[in-house]
Amino acid sequence: MLVKLFGSAVYGVDAITITVEVDTPGGPIGVYIVGLPDNAVKESTDRVISAIQNTGYDRPRGRIVINMAPADIKKAGAAYDLPIAMGILAATAQVPHPQLHEYVMMGELSLDGSVKPIKGALPIAIKTRAEKYKGLIVPKENAREAALVNNLEVYGVEHISEVIGFFRGDVELKPLKVNTREEFFDAQSHFELDFNDVKGQENVKRALEIAAAGGHNAILIGPPGAGKTMLAKRLPTILPPLTLHEALETTKIHSVAGKLPGNTSLVAQRPFRSPHHTISDVALVGGGGNPQPGEISLAHNGVLFLDELPEFKRTVLEVMRQPMEERRVSISRAKVSIDFPASFMLIASMNPCPCGFFNHPEKECTCSPIMVQRYLNKISGPLLDRIDLHVEVTPVPFSELSSQRTSEASDDVRARVINAREIQAKRYEDSPGTYANAQMSSKQLKEICTINTIGQNLLKTAMERLNLSARAYDRILKVSRTIADLADSPDIRPEHLAEAIQYRSLDREGWGG
């Protein structure tokens, strides 16, 4: 008997519907899977047969042929266990199959028939609704994630017997309903960290406020213990809240990577990713035999924090250059090319030299000028040019550490950032793909970042003295536009330019000998 039912394969951050055909054509006893399955899919036959037997049903005694179409797409992972098992039961007349083709089902099976969680439930649910299937059956652990997609009946199951009973009419499965908007807005502003935890460092907080307001990349340079990591971790608390569209987009990426926290179905806060400096190229940008998103994609719509930047391998840092410009990364293989979104804010931190005390106001640096230069040269000029703000972080004196004065809270800073972003949203409403000043194109830069004669002379002097590149010139204009937006100024004034120029520390003489 020939039976057709449907599963789904995740490629990149999108899903493709897979038709699972099961037939009993006669011939040598055995289960044969065709349609470009990988080893995990081929091994599923043993798991599936054990699950069928341990649930109280008969194992197939004849020849079973399973075709997974389209046959030119590789089928990877154990998530096809559930549709394969249901197809075998239907083909051997143990389960009625008139309604099987109306549902998409995915799930990994244990030998006792328990259904284990899968990756990518959200993009699978989006595809299921788009192709107008009646419902989606997934493991119970993935049900809340899939139920974020409205106008789709999502059933969460713990055991294959529930699925069998559902199609036999013996078990009533209730579709899970999730109030996506309520869940999203409830979780949006619950931060454990706050800017007022940081004593002093007002100049660094100001720089991070500018970075947040314009979506700019920043690097914090200072000695050990000055508070670089502490400040960077609090940056998401002053960024504008995610929109529902951004939250769903971010959740899709984390779902595909299997990185969704177990207690939530929706990423409601901007992600903060902080990979260790031993990370590989592939782990950072994504890839592998079955391409998976890397850290830069997991930081999409959020912050990628690279602590101790010079300790990262140079090749790892260089592969970020193109994604930082294009805000997406393309993974190309012989048979497939996948795009992962990678619109992130890069925040990096570093010591100014190997000992950490170059330009320290109190402690003496033990490094020679050549050592300092060699240390700074670990970061290429093209990468530094893509970082808009170079911020010096100096140690906090004891008087400020022991002060009882309360610093400005994240909510207050966030309000100014949101106001600046609203100005930019209105400015770029006719420019698809541009949402903040950091994303301005060269053409937009000429139209938007006009400066008067005094400002031009100031910028000319800075360019000549600091020997800045053309890209650094663009960065200064973009940052000054953001500073003007924070001041609610329609024009870029000389004081805005002056403040933007001071955030090019690594371009000044005195750094690197």
Image (cartoon, helix red, strand yellow):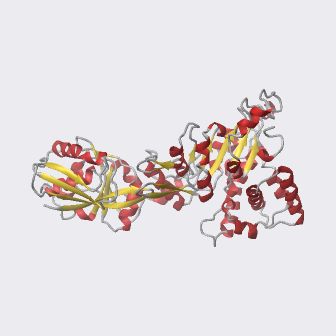
Indicate the quadrant containing the N terminus: top left, top right, bottom left or bottom right.
Answer: bottom left
Name the foreground residue: 123 vs 375: 375
On the image, the x and y values in percent for residue 279 come to 54, 39
User: Farthest residue in the front direction?
Assistant: 334
On the image, the x and y values in percent for residue 84 come to 23, 53
Residue 41 appears in the rendering: yes
Q: On the rendered structure, is 470 left or right of 256?
A: right
Indicate the quadrant containing the C terminus: top left, top right, bottom left or bottom right.
Answer: top right
Q: On the rendered structure, is 133 left or right of 21?
A: right
Q: On the rendered structure, is 118 left or right of 440?
A: left
Could you tell me which residue is drawn at 63 percent across and 70 percent down?
431
Residue 428 sits above or below residue 399 on the image: below
What is the number of callouts on the image?
0
Could you tell me which residue is drawn at 31 percent across and 66 percent down?
133
Q: On the rendered structure, is 183 left or right of 59?
A: right
Residue 197 appears in the rendering: no
On the image, the x and y values in percent for residue 209 come to 71, 51
Q: Quadrant of residue 392?
A: top right
User: Farthest residue in the bottom direction?
Assistant: 430
Name the foreground residue: 446 vs 113: 446
Residue 492 sits above or below residue 266 on the image: below
Could you tell me which residue is drawn at 26 percent across and 47 percent down?
42
On the image, the x and y values in percent for residue 328 come to 55, 57
